[in-house]
Amino acid sequence: MPDLPVTAGLLLAAGAGRRYGRPKALVELAGEPLVRRGIRLLGDGGCAPVHVVLGAGADEVPDLSGAVPVRHDRWPEGLGSSLRRGLASLPADVPAAVVVLVDQPLLSPVAVRRVRGAYARGAVVAVATYAGRRGHPVLLCRETWPLLDGYAVGDRGARDLLRDRPDLVVEVPCDDVGSPVDVDTPANLLGLRRVSDV
């Protein structure tokens, strides 16, 4: 893929992981904390800078070298507030950000580059799809960020904005690279450990 415009990376890793039993940022897969996998995903996908929104268990999170930690004390308000906090933390000259969730460790850097490629071709919002369903990564141009004030609330991120403004959205098929599967419980993690090449 040719050189792409620089975009930031935003990893949302603030939740308490109630169904899992502890913050998922601290959970390990193949000996690596999910928060480190998320940072590597965005970095390998060409994002810079990479910001990580932390909340529950923030003091226990391991080394975040290569990323900027963003403390979010209002994380109990839900995913929406974490998304808005993370976007607000990015430098003023950042034109767009690629957003991923810490509990989707099988996402691919190729998918990150694909949504960045859609942005290079003029997309305002680019969202990866898997079997026709929207998932992550999601790229959001800065001009859309103020719109999230009315959408990213509670445990809702950008999904409702994407639903209401289809004119802004470019879907990017990523069925052939990685998986959007969530790690919500220890049983989910055991299933991922059976997947080769994690």
Image (tube, rainbow, N blue to C red):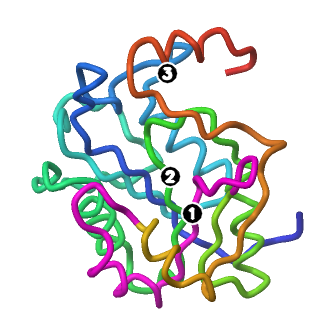
- State if disc 2 and disc 3 touch (CB < 8 Å): no
Q: Which residue in the protein does label 1 denote?
A: 138
Q: Position of residue 186 (x, y in %)?
A: 40, 13
Q: Residues within 10 Å of mark 2 (few under 14, many from 20)?
A: many
Q: Which residue in the protein does label 2 denote?
A: 100
Q: Position of residue 193 (x, y in %)?
A: 60, 11
Q: Out of 45 and 127, give the one closest to the viewer.
A: 127
Mark 3 vs 2, N-terminal side: 3
Q: Is residue 127 magenta?
A: no
What's the residue at 77%, 51% (across, down)? 174
In front: mark 3 or mark 2?
Answer: 2
In front: mark 1 or mark 3?
Answer: 1
- State if disc 2 and disc 1 touch (CB < 8 Å): yes
For marks 3 and 2, give the CA distance. Answer: 17 Å
Quarter the C terminus occupies = top right
What's the residue at 44%, 18% (across, down)? 28
For marks 1 and 3, give the CA distance. Answer: 24 Å
Decide if residue 39 is on the left or right side of residue 90: right
Which residues are the magenta region?
129-157
Q: Is residue 149 magenta?
A: yes
Q: Residues within 10 Å of mark 3 (few under 14, many from 20)?
A: few
Mark 1 vs 3, N-terminal side: 3
Q: Position of residue 141 (x, y in %)?
A: 53, 82
Q: Secondary structure at mark 2?
A: strand
Q: Hey, which quadrant is residue 176 in on the image?
A: top right
Decide if residue 188 is on the left or right side of residue 106: left
